[in-house]
Amino acid sequence: MIVVTGATGNIGRPLTRVLAEAGQEVTAVSRHTATVPDGVRHVVADLAQPASLTDTLTGAKALFLLLSGDLHAPDSNPADIIRAADSAGVRRVVLLSTQGVSTRPFGATRVAMRALEDVLRDSTLEWTILRPGGFASNALWWSESVRTQRVVAAPFGDVGLPIIDPVDIAEVAAACLLTDQHTGKTCELTGPEVITPRAQTNAIAAALGTPVHFHDLTRAEAKSALSQAMPPELAEDTLAILGAPTPAELHISPDVERVLGRAPRSFAEWAERNVGAFR
């Protein structure tokens, strides 16, 4: 059995599907009740309370660990999940980390994630760590304005990043869960090209078959908007990456192709597959 946490999100959902289609017994874990593929067991659990996973992990051979906000939940200790997996007899853990652990290691989020990586490395478990950069699915933040106004409003319109399709992350995770070829490796995951918000807008317009206008927000406007959805410190950190990516953040990694034997999907492919969100 393979346990997938965050099973209803942009990565966990396709990962659960890929594993089920591969004939694996899968337990999908999420915080709320959700629909999962036929044959997949669903468990409601809170990762901020590792004890709630004990029964779920018993008998599992592998765990995909995606923490999201649970990494910073009050009184949470995500390292206890790794220890619980070890105690339950889980053999392999694939941890979803973040590229920022290596490119911007001193923010609070990255310090906590690096500490969790170190706990996993120091355990007796087989492990693989995935460090993706920005997600193509972040463009869904623009879906309402595209639907209602045919406008994308974003800062730094001509500054690009090699963003990655979450389905590629899911397929890499599946490969790492199902074989031992990637054990003990840290994979940097990016898309195939550096693409700007303006170019993303053009790709969405092409998928829709109708023009979409790009409106370049000032940094102050963008920070105000982001601060409504995240702490101001994280908003400032996000803008620093979007506005002035480091050479390491602009690097196109070969790891998706190394694991999957094919190039990562482009943003245009993501836009075509998700065009319904923008109609």
Image: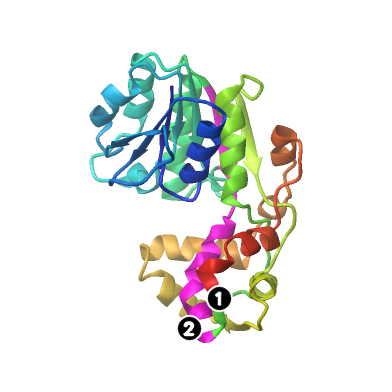
Question: Which residue bears the numbered disc 2?
Answer: 148
Viewer-proximal residue among 113 and 42: 42
The kind of residue tagged 2 is Thr
Q: Give neighbour class at mark 2: few <14, some 14-19, many 20+ (Cα, 10 Å).
A: few
The residue identified by callout 1 is: 154
Q: Secondary structure at mark 1?
A: strand
Q: Where residue 55 appears, x then y in whole percent?
A: 27, 22
The image quadrant that residue 200 belongs to is bottom right
Q: Find the magenta span and give its range.
A: 127-149
Q: Secondary structure at mark 2?
A: helix
Q: In whole angstroms, how far apart are the C-alphas of marks 1 and 2? A: 16 Å
Q: Is residue 99 left or right of residue 89?
A: right
Pair 1/2: label in front: 2
- Horizontal arrangement in the rendering, residue 222 relative to residue 77 (left or right): right
Q: Are marks 1 and 2 in contact (CB under 8 Å)?
A: no
Q: In what quadrant of the picture does the N terminus appear? A: top left
Relative to residue 15, is residue 193 depicted above or below?
below
The main secondary structure of the magenta stretch is helix
